[in-house]
Image (tube, rainbow, N blue to C red):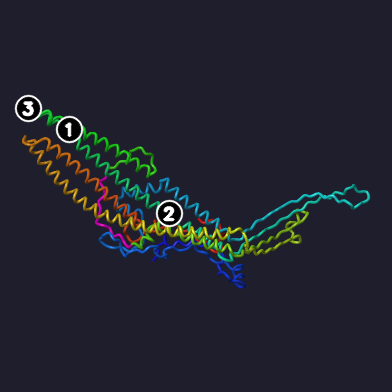
């Protein structure tokens, strides 16, 4: 069963019926007298544009066929805890790029309202006052001046109506295409929310890793300073040489340089996150949390489920549908169009008579127009729309393949990075044991200072590399979450489904067709 985000119906009241080409007689009467409802096309029925396997090639623990992503809050909290979810919520409320995407959705809704108005009767009221002067020449009147001048004032009050019945579905196709654009813009907003959430969490993870790298560098500097003091004391006591003092001092200075470099990168990471949050980049955001822990390999689901889970693919599919509908509309423009106009009102030389029915006037006109020769413009418009639809079809196919590649890459990275982390842990354990044994020997007076220095550098490097690979695993998990449309639970919350694909309000038959809210 499709979720609200996959079944957004944009109904409009008092719509035109869409008879098939070649209909006449009673069908034309039905068009003129009856109203029908036009819905934007539903998504999810289009077959994948490329052949997809039953499951992704990369190994996984299980398979989830759900086509529904969970709420942004849910998967962000499960990934990075409440602190990470709070940062995502802050970014969703304040990020300028997201507000710009929401504004584009508003613009698409407004354009759909403009397009839909073409199929409705146009009503206008007019009032005019005509003051004229006429010279009567050739009519002699005894005692009257020549020429004889006549002045008159004419008042007109009229209500005009014009309507173009949609005989071949041209207006309906244009309107459906505009509504499909609204759906695509709503999916763009959902995709932007998902992408922003992933970007915030990626920046947060990077910030936590850089903070821990700074802490590691600070501990390393402190350790090297202790070694410098110890070597100097031993040298002063006649149990060392000047070379050892200089080597340890050199390593201490190098550690201080590494600390300064990591502090610089940390401040840059803080400012990058603050910008995503819509804050001033003051580098004041604290990061005292540990890196999030990862569970086992997540279930990736089936490739075909991406067509419903990923909002960017839904948007591409809806734009393809809009292109097909516009092609139909350009094709329908080759057929005759019927235009009905009429007016009713009053006309009198006395302003007080405008509301008197005895001075009433009316006018009714029907006009059937068949394009015959326009220099090939209409045929060329059909060709352009057809080519545009083919472009959108290929773009949809490319987007599906790219989405599958993103999932495969992320799943593959999950396995390789997990193996790398295990190897890094083993390397760190060995380096720590080696450094401990060499330090014990050196303090006992039997060890080589060069071996100890090399061991301490190796342990520091192993700790830093382990932090880096853990951060890389978190980045890969975010890549997978983003590639799968966000999260692995079965269903989104109602609030997030509304944010992902907001409905256009359903108008009742007695409502005025105006705006698309």
Residue range (magenta): 288-302
Asked if the magenta segment contains residue 346, the reply would be no
User: Which comes sooner in the sequence, label 1 or label 2?
Assistant: 2
The CA span between labels 1 and 2 is 54 Å
Disc number lying in front (1 or 3): 3
Q: Quadrant of residue 277?
A: top left
Closest to the observer, 159 or 322: 322
Q: Which residue is mark 2?
A: 188
Q: In the shown orientation, is residue 64 left or right of residue 352?
A: left
Numbered tag placed on residue 225 in the rendering: 1
Dominant secondary structure, magenta:
loop
Q: Which residue occupies 32% across, 65% down?
A: 54
Q: Position of residue 483 (x, y in %)?
A: 34, 55
To which residue does mark 3 refer? Answer: 238
**C-alpha span from label 1 to label 3:** 20 Å
The numbered disc on residue 200 is none
Q: Secondary structure at mark 2?
A: helix
352 sits left or right of 95 in the view: right
Residue at figure coordinates x 52%, y 64% from the top left: 38
Instruction: State the CA–CA distance, disc 2 to disc 3.
Output: 73 Å
**In the rendered structure, which disc, 1 or 3, sits on the residue that comes first in sequence?**
1
| Residue 7 relative to residue 144: left or right | left
Q: Position of residue 495 (x, y in %)?
A: 40, 56
* Neighbourhood count class around disc 2 (C-alpha, 10 Å): few under 14, some 14–19, many 20 upward: many
Q: Residue furthest front?
A: 375
Quick check: 19 above or below 155?
below
């Amino acid at each position: 069963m499709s979720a609200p985000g996959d079944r957004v119906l944009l109904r409009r009241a008092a719509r035109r019926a869409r008879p098939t080409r070649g209909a006449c007689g009673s069908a034309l009467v039905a068009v003129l007298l009856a109203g029908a409802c036009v819905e934007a096309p539903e998504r999810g029925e289009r077959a994948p544009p490329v052949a997809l396997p039953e499951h992704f090639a990369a190994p996984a623990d299980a398979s989830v066929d759900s086509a529904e992503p969970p709420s942004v809050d849910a998967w962000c909290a499960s990934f990075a805890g409440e602190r990470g979810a709070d940062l995502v919520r802050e970014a969703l409320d304040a990020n300028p790029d997201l507000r710009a995407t929401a504004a584009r959705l508003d613009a698409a809704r407004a354009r759909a309202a403009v397009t839909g108005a073409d199929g409705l009767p146009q009503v206008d009221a007019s009032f005019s006052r005509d003051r004229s002067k006429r010279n009567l020449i050739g009519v002699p009147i005894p005692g009257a001046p020549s020429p004889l001048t006549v002045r008159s004032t004419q008042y007109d009050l009229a209500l005009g109506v014009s309507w173009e019945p949609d005989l071949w579905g041209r207006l309906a196709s244009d309107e459906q295409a505009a509504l499909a654009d609204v759906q695509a813009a709503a999916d763009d907003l959902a995709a932007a929310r998902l992408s922003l959430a992933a970007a915030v969490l990626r920046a947060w993870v990077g910030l936590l890793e850089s903070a821990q790298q700074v802490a590691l560098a600070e501990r390393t500097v402190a350790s090297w300073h202790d070694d410098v003091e110890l070597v100097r004391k031993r040298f002063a006591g006649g149990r060392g040489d000047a070379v050892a003092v200089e080597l340890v001092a050199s390593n201490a200075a190098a550690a201080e340089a590494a600390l300064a470099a990591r502090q610089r990168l940390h401040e840059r990471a803080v400012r990058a996150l603050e910008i995503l949050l819509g804050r001033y980049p003051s580098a004041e955001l604290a990061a005292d949390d540990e890196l999030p822990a990862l569970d086992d390999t997540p279930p990736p689901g089936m490739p075909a489920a991406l067509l419903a889970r990923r909002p960017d693919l839904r948007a591409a599919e809806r734009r393809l549908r809009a292109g097909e509908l516009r092609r139909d509309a350009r094709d329908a423009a080759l057929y005759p169009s019927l235009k009905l106009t009429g007016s009713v009102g009053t006309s009198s030389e006395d302003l007080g008579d405008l509301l008197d029915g005895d001075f009433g006037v009316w006018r009714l006109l029907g006009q059937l127009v068949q394009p015959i020769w326009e220099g090939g413009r209409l045929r060329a418009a059909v060709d352009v729309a057809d080519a545009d639809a083919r472009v959108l079809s290929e773009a949809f196919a490319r987007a599906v393949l790219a989405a599958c590649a993103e999932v495969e890459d992320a799943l593959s990275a999950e396995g390789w990075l997990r193996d790398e982390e295990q190897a890094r842990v083993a390397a760190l354990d060995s380096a720590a044991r080696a450094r401990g044994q060499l330090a014990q020997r050196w303090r006992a007076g039997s060890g080589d200072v060069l071996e100890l220095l090399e061991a301490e550098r190796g342990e520091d490097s192993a700790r830093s590399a382990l932090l880096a690979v853990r951060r890389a695993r978190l980045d890969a998990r975010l890549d997978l979450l983003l590639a799968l449309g966000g999260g692995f639970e079965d269903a989104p919350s109602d609030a997030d489904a509304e944010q992902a694909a907001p409905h256009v309000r359903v108008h009742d038959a007695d409502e005025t067709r105006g705006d698309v809210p």
